[in-house]
Amino acid sequence: MAETAATLPQPLGSRTRVLAWLQRYGVYASVLALLLFNVAFTPHFLEVANFRTQLIQVAPVVITALGMALVIGTEGIDLSVGSVMALSSAMVVLYLGYGAPVAIAAALVAGALVGAGGGALVAYAGVQPIVATLALLVGVRGLANVLVPQLTEFRNPALITLGSRSVLGLPLVVVIAAALTAVVAFVVKRTIFGRQLVAVGGNRAAAKLSGLPVRRILVAVYVLSGLLAAVAGVLATARLQASDPTSLGLLMELSAITAVVVGGTPLTGGRVRVLGTVMGALLIQLLQATLIKHNLPQSWTQMVQAVIILAAVYAARGRKK
Amino acid sequence: MTTLEAAPAAPAKGERASQILQHHGALMVLAATVLIGGIAFDSFATPRNAANIAVSSSFVAIIAIGMTFVVISGGIDLSVGSSFVLAGVLAAYGSRYGVVVALLLPLAVCGTIGLLQGLVIARTGMAPFIVTLAGLLGMRGLMLAVSGEGANTYLVESDAFASLGQASFLGLTVPVYITLGLFALGAILLQRTGFGQSVYAIGGSEEAAALMGVPVARVKTTVYLLSGLLAGLAGALNAARLSSGVTILGAGLELDVIAAVVIGGTLLTGGAGGLTGTMAGVLLLGVIQSLINQVGTLTSSFQQVVSGAFLALVVVVQRLLHRAQHLS
């Protein structure tokens, strides 16, 4: 820490600067460090198959984390994403009789509706995001379980394609995640909606006073989060070739929040780091893979993850003031 | 804005009514639910069923007491579910060295982690939500590490310890009495001591509390310590009841507890609420569960749907009441 501080032009407030730098680039540095470590010490790490597996596993987390980043950008939080994944998975099975497109559409509509419900609670009823989406977390998971009580397998060629096909050597799931990342990055950086979203998160009162449709923006953000979680649910279901509402997406909200926070998006809103979020998800995935490949138990992953979250939020704290 | 119509013409009266509803709403709904349940099902309003509800609610209730303190102080503790499971495993493991170790080991570990979380929250100003989220993950990791990645289920080897969870008196098991005792102690601590007043003051406005000379950091640290200790105690008692340290139960318990606290009328924004409401909230969730079991054709997933819907309804009504009070 001392060396880094010394290279900075101003010695005063250097600690804040280090923290700010860490918040901005810490996740990239950590991913790079982990990659280098693995290249040096993990056998078979540089094989294509390994990267494929890692990317496929991380895709649903990335997709849900994108929605979570938008919500956190508005100073909110969406705890319902894991349950939305389960509900969308249940919808896929329920409507598969009408063909894959209808089933997928039903899943996405369900996700958007849950998002709209959460958004309405937050924007119109004025309920705190954490409670509103907590109610949805509990209720929607229950609903998914009521609709599809046990693991249901299915055979559908279209969904097999979606889950397992590759485009130009990349799994379709990964391509979709990358495309969605690009779309969300574009929305945040280059559209009016993106600007409004950040404005609402930065200072809600000011956004309201300057005439922004704050409530509509909030609802839209939660709808997007629900929609993205539903996409993740559909993709996970397509890969599994089965719907398992009891366990699909369980604790996904924690992974998504971790990815967002580690990626440098402050919980206080007003800033969305899309690429950082993707990197955050990759970091956690890479960390898990590294520990597994070196025969360290799963319990380590969770404890290390806890430390990383704390470090990330601690770094973010300096900027808030 | 529709709240304007909801508020009756006479403002003073409406204000009173809405305050009463906010403070005792959960209790009223609980009474109504029990009444309806009693009329609808013969086997519902029986001492046996009431005892069942009391026993199964007692563990959530113990954790909810700590959570109420945390929430009134304006914070939240997401780590209690992990704490509960970890304590269960530690208690079962410790029971081979006797009842004292079986109780003290989980309390020491969960208390220490609660204390650490409190220190981090109070001293660094990091959001309680994220610190206790890290606590949730960290303690789950610790639990897996202690139990051989969840593969070892330690059995309780001390009869004295097992009786703490299983012995019954007048049809109710020991944890129910412990819950009642802790509830009384907690209520006194919250309503009748300087510490309790500080908790309310900090939840109302941290700056104002600090200016009044309330030791903000110390009080905040203490509420998380308390929450950790109570979650640890609940976990230990549960292990005594089940005679083993089950590693899979208790995940997501924090959500039930928070739901009960919120339904009980404690505002998540801090500064308002109380333990009576929390107890009503815990019992209400227990009664709903019991009613759904009575219907028989409904699965437990249905209970989640009802709980979720109920929670959403309660927070919306709370917001409307809040607005009515501030507009009239």
Image: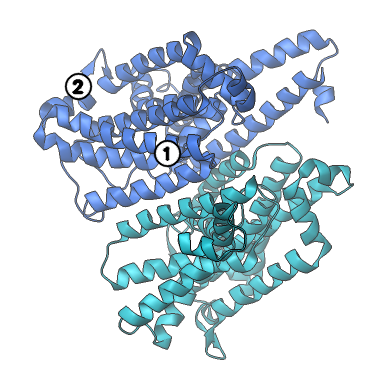
Chain colours: A cyan, B blue
Of helix, strand and loop, which one carries label 1?
helix
Q: Name the residue tied to disc 2.
A: B167
Please state which of residues B163 and A159 is positioned toward the viewer in this rendering: B163
Which residue lies at the image location 49% right of the left edge and 53% below the top edge? A254
Residue type at numbered disc 2: Ala
Relative to B119, does residue A43 appear above or below in the rendering? below
Q: Position of residue B40 (x, y in %)?
A: 50, 23
Chain letter, disc 2 residue: B
Q: Earlier in the sequence, mark 1 or mark 2?
A: 1
Q: Quadrant of residue A161?
A: bottom right
As drawn, the residue found furthest toward the bottom would be A168
Q: Secondary structure at mark 2?
A: loop
Observer-nearest of B166 and A299:
A299
Question: In the rendered view, would you say B54 is above or below A134?
Answer: above
Q: Which quadrant does the C terminus of chain A fall into?
A: top right
- Compared with B131, B10 (above or below) is above
The location of residue B157, given as percent across then percent down, is 11, 36
Find residue A19 and name its label.
none
- Mark 2 neighbour density, 10 Å: few (under 14) some (14–19) many (20 or more): some
Which amino acid does the dot numbered 1 rest on? Answer: Gln
Question: Is residue A180 left or right of B44 when viewed as pictured?
Answer: right
Residue where numbered disc 1 is placed: B117
